[in-house]
Amino acid sequence: MNYRITYILVLLLLFSSCAKENNLRCNLLYEKALHRWLQYSLTDSTLCLEEAKLYLDSIDCRPVKRKVFELNLSVRYLLKDYEGGKKYVESFNSSDFATSYKKDMYIKAFEAAIFESRGDTVRRNQLFKKLINEIQLYLNKTPNEESLYDLFLVKRIIEDQSEILKEIEHIRSSKLYEDKVIDSIILMLETSDKNQTFIFN
């Protein structure tokens, strides 16, 4: 009996040690990928992105940390690997995301990029309209700052900015959100590229 308990304890210690070692390895791979991504921002060399992707594809830690997920999306988008980005998001469960619409949001962003790359802005806009409705339905039930930001991140791509600003000021007058939240959304609208169809939070 004592032998069995000792055996179980040794196994637990081994598993714990392996998990810690694996986490360190994953963090190192992430740092290397981030470094290559930063180098791309300075050089525009797609080789840097390809190397970043290789590092990210080697990360097998579960659960995948948000920073790894977001960097992976960014790298795939910049490489125009829209199909790969879509499949990557699809490999996760809906429960891995903080909100019910989030997985679909990322999938639709890559699908929209695929349509846009083919010159099909009509179908791209249809996707974004569906997504706007999804986020709005979620906000109606669960008002929160992040989802409000998501909503206008999508709206800025297909809607007129002056109309969006009117809507935002109407939301401000409702006092449902703090002024600083509304101001940060307005700043995002003023500084973001309307033609950037990637939704990245």
Image (cartoon, rainbow, N blue to C red):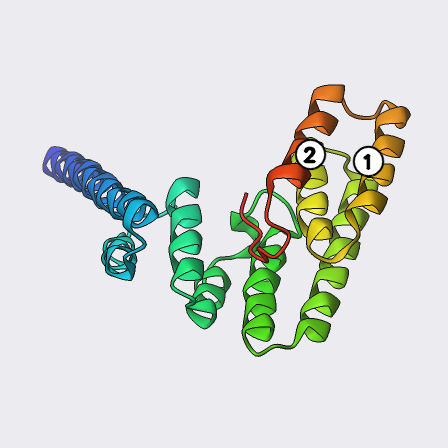
* Residue at the spot 9% in from the left edge and 37% down from the top edge: 3
Pointer 1: residues within 10 angstroms few (<14), some, or many (20+)?
A: some
Side of 42 where 73 appears, left or right: right
Up the image or down, 18 lies above or below 174; here it is below
Quarter of image, res 104:
bottom right
In primary-sequence order, the first of circles 2 and 1 is: 1
Residue at image point 58% right, 61% down: 109
Q: CA distance from mark 2 to mark 1?
A: 8 Å
Q: Which residue is mark 2?
A: 185
- Seen at 89% across and 33% down, the residue is 170
Residue closest to the eye, 198 or 175? 198
Q: Quadrant of residue 107?
A: bottom right
> Residue 194: x, y in percent?
64, 52
**Kind of residue at badge 1:** Ile
Q: Give how far across and how far down residue 122 sits, in percent.
A: 73, 74
**Residue at x-position 38% and y-position 63%:** 79
- Mark 2 residue type: Ile
Q: Viewer-proximal residue, 177 or 143?
A: 177
Q: Position of residue 118 (x, y in %)?
A: 57, 79
The residue that disc 1 covers is 168
Relative to residue 181, is residue 193 depicted above or below?
Answer: below
Dot 1 falls on a residue whose secondary structure is helix
Q: Are marks 2 and 1 in contact (CB under 8 Å)?
A: yes
Q: Position of residue 152 (x, y in %)?
A: 72, 44
**66 over 112 or under it: above or below:** above
Work out whether residue 118 or residue 181 is closer to the camera in this orientation and state it.
118
